[in-house]
C-alpha cells in the first residue's frame, strides 16, 4: 500500500477503506509517513469530507494508537460527559459529584485549558493539595471505593491524535468537522466509558460558531460513538455569553460549591440538570428524564451532592474544608468593579473576548507553557437580558495588578447595552442519532 495513492483517492472525493485508514494512522504514529504527506491528506479531508463510516474508522484507529483505559472492573454503567469547551464552563466540577451522589460511578478524564477555553484540571488544582495525576489502578480503585474520580489525561492516550492535532494547527485544517469529531471521540472512547453525553457548544465562545456547524459536529460525534458500540447522545447549548457568573479557576470552584449547595447561577444549574438527567437515564438509574432530574434535585437539597464533592477532594489529597470555607481558596489582590457607562439592558456579552480578557489577567494560557494564576478572573453581575443602571457594576475584575486600563476597555468593547434585550435560549437541541 502506497500512501500517495491514499492521498490521491481522498483528493478525488472517494471514501477510504478501513484498511487504508488503519495504514495511515499506524504508520504516521510510528513515524514512517512524513508530516508533508499527512498534511496533504488532511487538506484533502478538509475539502472532501468523510463518510460516517470513515469517521468511525478514523476514530477507532486513533483510539487504539496508544493506551486505552479498561473500566470493566468498576461496578455499574460508567457514563462520561464531554464539553466542546467555552468560557465559565464549570459543569464537570458540579456534575461529577452530583451524578456520583446517585451511586453512579463517575470515572472522568479531563484536560487543561488553552486560549479562552478553561480547563477542568486547572480548576481542580486550585484546591490546596488536590492531586490530579493518579495511576490507572489508583483511579479505578478510587471510583470503586468512593464512586468518583477526576484525573488528567494519560500521557500515552491517543498519541495519533496528539500528532495530528499539532499538524492540523499549522496547516489550516483545524476546522474540519470529521477531524474535530474523530479527535474528540477517540479520546473519549479510549477513556473507557460505557456511554457518553456530549455538550456541544454554539456561539461566540464555542469551537463551532454557528448552529449549522454545531449540529453537524454533534451528529458526527453521536454517529461515531454509536457505531463503535457506546451509547452516545449530544445536547447543543449556548455559548454566546459565558456560562454562569465566574470566569477563572478559584472563582469557578467557588461557583461550583454554590451550585452544589443549590445557590448557583440559573443557567449553570439548568445545564447541569439537563446533562445530568441524560447521564442518569443512560446509567439506568431512572426511566425518564423527569425522574432523573427529580433525583438530582433531591441530592442537592439533602446535601448528598456537596458531601460527595468533599469525598472527591479528600480522596485525591485535597483540603475539603474549602467547601465550607471557600475563602481559603486563592483570592486576588485587587477586586475592581466595572461600572456601566449607560443605562439600559445588556444585549450582548461576547463570550470568547471575555474569556481572552480573563486569560490576559492570568486565568488562562496563551501557550501551553504559560503558568496560570488561580486567583484571578472575572465575576459577572449582569447577564444578557438583565437591566442595568448607569454606574452600576457590570462585573468585578479579580486581578494581581491595578493597571487594568487595556482590560477594562476590552471588556467595555465586548459588552453591549441597548434599549431592550431578551435572555438567550440555553438548550437548543438534543441529538441521539
Image (cartoon, rainbow, N blue to C red):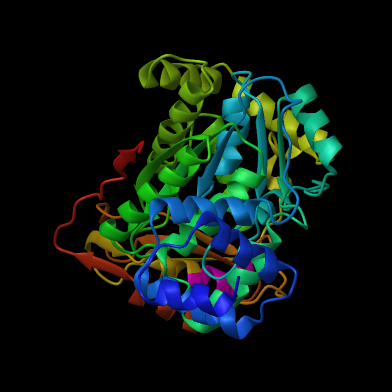
Instruction: Work out whether residue 358 or residue 398 is closer to the camera in this orientation and state it.
Output: 358
Residue 382 at x, y percent in the picture? 35, 54
In the image, residue 278 lies at what x, y percent? 44, 29
Counting from the top left corner in percent of width and height, residue 39 is at: 54, 80
Q: Is residue 246 above or below residue 209?
A: above
Q: In the picture provided, is 125 more to the left or to the right than 362?
A: right
Question: Does residue 391 lie above or below 367 as drawn?
Answer: above
Q: Main secondary structure of the magenta part?
A: helix
- Which residue is at the front of the view, 263 or 275? 275
Q: Residue at x 60, y 44 (%)?
A: 189
Going by the image, does 346 lie left or right of 118?
left
Q: Is residue 372 magenta?
A: no
Across and down, in percent, residue 220 comes to: 40, 51
Tell me where residue 353 sits by quadrant: bottom left
Q: Which residues, given as a range, are shown in magenta?
A: 356-364
Residue at x 31% of width, y 45% of height = 426
For the C terminus, the image quarter is: top left
Give the residue displayed 59% in from the left and 31% down from the top.
Answer: 194
Does residue 313 lie above or below 420 as drawn? above
Quadrant in the rendering for residue 211: bottom left
Left or right side of 158 for 265: left
The number of discs equals: 0
**Can I make out residue 118 in this image?**
no
Amino acid at each position: 500500500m502506497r500512501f500517495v495513492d491514499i492521498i490521491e483517492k481522498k483528493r478525488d472525493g472517494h471514501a477510504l477503506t478501513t484498511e487504508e485508514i488503519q495504514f495511515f494512522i499506524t504508520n504516521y504514529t510510528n513515524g514512517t509517513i512524513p508530516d508533508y504527506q499527512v498534511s496533504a491528506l488532511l487538506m484533502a479531508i478538509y475539502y472532501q469530507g468523510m463518510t460516517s463510516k470513515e469517521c468511525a474508522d478514523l476514530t477507532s484507529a486513533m483510539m487504539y494508537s496508544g493506551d486505552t483505559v479498561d473500566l470493566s472492573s468498576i461496578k455499574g454503567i460508567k457514563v462520561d460527559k464531554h464539553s466542546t469547551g467555552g468560557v465559565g464552563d464549570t459543569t464537570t466540577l458540579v456534575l461529577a459529584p452530583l451524578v456520583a451522589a446517585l451511586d453512579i460511578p463517575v470515572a472522568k478524564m479531563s484536560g487543561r485549558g488553552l486560549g479562552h477555553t478553561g480547563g477542568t484540571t486547572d480548576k481542580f488544582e486550585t484546591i490546596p493539595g488536590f492531586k490530579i495525576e493518579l495511576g490507572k489502578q489508583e483511579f479505578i480503585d478510587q471510583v470503586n471505593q468512593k464512586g468518583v474520580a477526576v484525573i488528567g489525561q494519560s500521557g500515552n492516550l491517543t498519541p495519533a491524535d496528539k500528532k495530528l492535532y499539532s499538524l492540523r494547527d499549522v496547516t489550516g485544517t483545524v476546522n474540519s468537522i470529521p477531524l474535530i469529531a474523530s479527535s474528540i471521540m477517540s479520546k473519549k472512547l479510549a477513556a473507557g466509558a460505557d456511554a457518553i453525553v456530549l455538550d456541544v457548544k454554539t456561539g461566540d465562545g464555542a469551537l463551532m460558531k454557528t448552529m449549522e456547524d454545531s449540529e453537524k459536529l454533534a451528529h458526527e460525534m453521536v454517529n461515531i460513538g454509536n457505531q463503535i458500540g457506546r451509547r452516545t447522545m449530544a445536547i447543543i447549548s449556548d455559548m454566546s455569553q459565558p456560562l454562569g457568573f465566574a470566569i477563572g479557576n478559584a472563582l469557578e470552584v467557588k461557583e461550583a460549591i454554590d451550585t452544589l449547595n443549590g445557590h448557583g447561577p440559573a443557567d449553570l444549574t439548568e445545564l447541569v440538570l439537563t446533562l445530568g438527567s441524560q447521564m442518569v437515564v443512560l446509567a439506568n438509574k431512572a426511566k425518564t428524564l423527569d425522574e432523573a432530574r427529580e433525583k438530582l434535585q433531591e441530592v442537592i437539597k439533602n446535601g448528598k451532592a456537596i458531601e460527595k464533592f468533599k469525598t472527591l477532594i479528600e480522596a485525591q489529597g485535597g483540603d475539603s474544608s474549602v467547601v465550607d470555607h471557600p475563602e481559603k481558596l486563592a483570592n486576588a489582590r485587587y477586586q475592581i468593579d466595572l461600572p456601566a457607562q449607560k443605562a439600559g439592558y445588556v444585549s450582548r456579552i461576547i463570550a470568547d473576548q471575555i474569556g481572552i480578557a480573563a486569560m490576559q489577567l492570568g486565568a488562562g494560557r496563551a501557550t501551553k507553557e504559560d503558568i496560570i494564576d488561580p486567583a484571578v478572573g472575572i465575576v459577572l453581575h449582569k447577564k444578557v437580558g438583565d437591566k442595568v443602571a448607569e454606574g452600576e457594576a457590570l462585573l468585578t475584575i479579580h486581578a494581581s495588578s491595578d493597571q487594568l486600563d487595556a482590560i477594562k476597555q476590552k471588556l467595555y468593547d465586548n459588552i453591549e447595552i441597548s434599549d431592550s434585550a431578551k435572555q438567550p435560549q440555553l438548550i437548543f437541541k438534543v441529538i441521539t442519532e
